[in-house]
Image (cartoon, grey):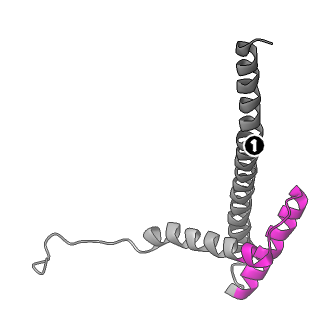
């Protein structure tokens, strides 16, 4: 073998080592993180749907009863989709987040702010 062949062979082996040791694990981590993020987004959307449907179906019930029903509906939905790995505490948090977002959206419509331009106090 010539000296040039040995150097090229060594460079190729180093490149393969670098790809195997660094690039492949980094790519796998990115794929896993992206998949987890999409699952969380899907569960958040399902929580929003569960909260809105419970609010529509159980208007006369208490907040505790509504939350229990929303949690039951969300749990049923994620099991139906085959999504696993979410604890009850996490699902409770997602339900509470959906409720807060719903209230934030309804609040400006429910309490409009009117400023009277003729009021001397202003």
Residue 114 coordinates in the image, percent (x, y): 29, 71
Identified at 62% across, 71% down, the residue is: 97
The residues colored magenta run 64-92
Residue picked out by circle 1? 21
* Residue 41, placed above or below residue 61: above
Vertical side of 12 occupied by 26: above or below: below
Is 10 covered by the magenta stretch? no
Choose between 44 and 25: the one closer to the eye: 25
Residue depicted at 69% across the width and 62% down the height: 44
For this rendering, which residue is in front, 75 or 63? Answer: 75
Q: Secondary structure at mark 1?
A: helix
Left or right, residue 96 beside residue 109:
right
- Give the residue at x 71% y 40%: 23
Q: Is residue 68 magenta?
A: yes
- What is the quadrant of residue 91 in the picture? bottom right
Q: In the shown orientation, is residue 52 left or right of residue 9? A: left
Residue 44 visible in the shown view? yes
Disc 1 crowd rating (10 Å Cα; few below 14, some 14-19, many 20+) is few
Q: Position of residue 100 (x, y in %)?
A: 57, 73
Outermost residue, left side: 120
| Quadrant of image for the C terminus | bottom left
């Amino acid at each position: 073998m010539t000296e040039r062949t040995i150097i090229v062979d060594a460079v190729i082996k180093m490149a393969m080592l670098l790809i195997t040791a660094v690039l492949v694990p980094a790519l796998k981590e990115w794929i896993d993180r992206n998949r987890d993020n999409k699952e969380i987004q899907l569960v958040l959307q399902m929580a929003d749907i569960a909260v809105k449907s419970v609010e529509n179906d159980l208007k006369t019930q208490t907040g505790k009863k509504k939350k229990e029903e929303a949690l039951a509906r969300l749990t049923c939905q994620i099991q139906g989709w085959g999504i696993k790995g979410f604890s009850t505490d996490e699902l409770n948090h997602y339900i509470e987040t959906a409720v807060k977002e719903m209230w934030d959206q309804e609040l400006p419509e429910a309490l409009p702010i009117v400023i009277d331009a003729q009021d001397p106090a202003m």
